[in-house]
Image (tube, rainbow, N blue to C red):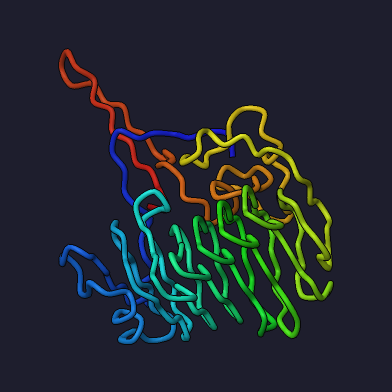
Amino acid sequence: MKKLFFAVAFAVAAIPAFSTITIVDINGAGQFTSIQLAIDNSLPGDTIQVWPGTYNGAININKNVVLQGSGYENTIITSASTPTIMMSNGLIKWFMISSTYGIGLQISNGHVHNCVFKGAANYGIYCNNGTTGYIQNCVILNNGSYGIYATSPGYLTVVNCIGRANTNTDFYNPNQSALNLSYSDGSQQYSANSQGVFNSDPIFVSTTNYHLSTGSPCFDTGQPSLSDPDGSISDIGYFGGPDCPIFPVVYQMTVSPNGNNINIQAKARANY
């Protein structure tokens, strides 16, 4: 995705009426201050929106809910346990995830989109039991062991991801059949599929800003069947793919004279 559009005023896209929305705010402005309590009190199909903050404590996502952060820059899940997140269902997006003791995420089933896994003491992501675990448009870096470690009898699909500066291999599959890796940037060993995989500097804006800079090999080199919000082929990394967190995109603008002035009103949509 190459262009970011700003709006004078914008309206966030409407939430479907059938979805129950729960707010988690560590400062007390939502229904819960704890992510786990929000999950425990949710029903399949619900969306849990987590407002900015650092949330300490391990969580277990074992039902079909959407757990939506406020961006990796603002919403961090960490713990002194391992794993920080145990996942067997649902969808996670727009978080930074870490562990001061061990594994950031242990996944058997479910989807993780557009998250950053950084600074875990052990693996960033671990899969050893499951058939439908799916990781898309994530950045996995600076973890204490492997970035992603997938081993039989698990099976993990990884698409449009960037692995960087992990202590060991970025994408590792010792059994040579448990990791379906494609259209990603990072070092790999024994993946079941390496289509579109390369190992080059993604050229981030900075060590903490994971936008891609001009000349990045990750622009428009993601899975061809996935698109960025601007309609181009998906970029690899956090700011790519259909679930990419984006700045407001203007879809309607009204210009009207008002005496000696001109009023401009714009509407835009944004993921957050």
Specify the farthest residue to the top. 260
Q: Nearer the viewer, residue 264 or 247?
A: 247
Q: Where is residue 243 in the image (x, y as percent from the top left)?
A: 53, 56
- Position of 157 with respect to 27 (left or right) is right
Q: In which quarter of the image is residue 94?
A: bottom left
Q: Which of 134 and 207 is in front in this view?
A: 207
In the image, is residue 53 above or below residue 65? Answer: above
Left or right: 207 as drawn, with respect to 152: left
x 40%, y 78%: residue: 59
Question: In the picture shown, does residue 69 fall above or below 62?
Answer: above
Q: Which residue is drawn at 62% across and 45% down?
A: 231
Q: Where is residue 8 in the image (x, y as percent from the top left)?
A: 30, 33
Quadrant for residue 1, please give it: top right
User: Where does the image place residue 254, in percent across and percent down from the top left?
Assistant: 33, 32
> Where on the picture, by quarter, is residue 260?
top left
- Is 154 left, or right, of 122 in this rendering? right
Could you tell me residue 24's position as x and y percent? 27, 69
Above or below, comparing residue 118 to residue 56 in the picture: above
Q: In this view, does 17 lie to the left or right of 201?
A: left
Instruction: Tell me what residue is drawn at x 61 percent, y 81 percent.
Output: 108
